[in-house]
Each structure stands twice: as structure tokens, then as C-alpha cells.
Amino acid sequence: MQVERGEIIARSLTGRCPNCGAFGMFKHWFRLNKHCTGCEMPLEKEDSGFYFGTTSIGYVLAIIVVIIPICVLVVKEVVGMWTGVIIGIVGSVLLTTLLYPLMLSWVIMSYYTMFPNELPANSEASDET
């Protein structure tokens, strides 16, 4: 394999293409390019351009980073219940909005970490041998 799992993970965690390492995956904040601008690897998996796996990642991050700490503060009576609810909702929406591009990268990372031979760079390497 030309691109090892560790390299796929390192590239994807920083929002770079897992295939070539270029910062050419994003069309704008909420949308991927159809292909990486560095290596032309196809990126869009669903017709809308969105990866539904980001929803799962967003839920988990919101629960761990926002909801659980707010629940603890409400139980310890540091903040009131309705204040906690409002902070939880606003915080969850802000967190998932701010991290959406990285969550797209993480979904792509999880796929290619499980199936590294699906990367074009690795497919070409296996074709040559």
C-alpha cells in the first residue's frame, strides 16, 4: 500500500484528502467538491453532497462536549434547568456547525481506514504489482 492507515487518519483528521494529502476536498463549509482538487479522487457519495455519517458524529460530540457537562451543572444547581436547556441547544448547534467540515473528513477517514485498498493511490499500487 502506498498510503498506510496511519497516514489516512492523519490526513483526514486535519481536513486533507486521504488519497493525496491536499486541502482540496471542500467546495464550501457544508459541501464537498465532487472530486479532490489535488488528485481528482471522487468525494461525493450521496446525491446531496452530504454524508449522513456526520449526523452520528455530531450527536456523539454534542452529547459528550455539551449535553453531559450542562446536565452536571444543572444537577449541581450551578445553572437553572431552562438555562441549561437553552445552553445545551445553542451549544450543540454551534458545535456541530463549526465542526461540520472536520466531521465530513472523519466520515471519509472511517471508510478508508476500514478499506484502505479502495483509495485510488492504493488501487494503482496494487494494480502495478
Image (cartoon, helix red, strand yellow):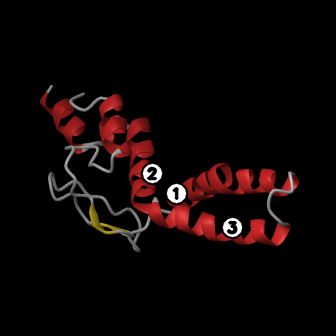
Mark 2 neighbour class, 10 Å CA radius: few under 14, some 14 to 19, many 20 or more: some
Identify residue for label 1.
53
Dot 1: element:
helix
Identify residue for label 3.
87
Query: Callout 2, which amino acid?
Result: Val
At horizontal 84% and vertical 67% (from top left) the residue drawn is 81
Q: Please give the label number shown on residue 12.
A: none
Disc 1 versus disc 3: nearer the observer: 3
Rendered location of residue 40, percent (x, y): 17, 56
Q: Is residue 25 left or right of residue 108?
A: left
Identify residue for label 2.
107
Among the two numbered marks 2 and 1 on one chain, the one whose residue lies closer to the N terminus: 1
Q: Nearer the viewer, residue 22 or 64?
A: 64
Classify the position of the C terminus by image quarter.
Answer: top left
Query: Callout 3, which amino acid?
Result: Ile
Q: Nearer the viewer, residue 59 or 87?
A: 87
Rendered location of residue 114, percent (x, y): 44, 37
Among the two numbered marks 1 and 3 on one chain, the one whose residue lies closer to the N terminus: 1
* C-beta proximity under 8 Å, tags 2 and 1: yes
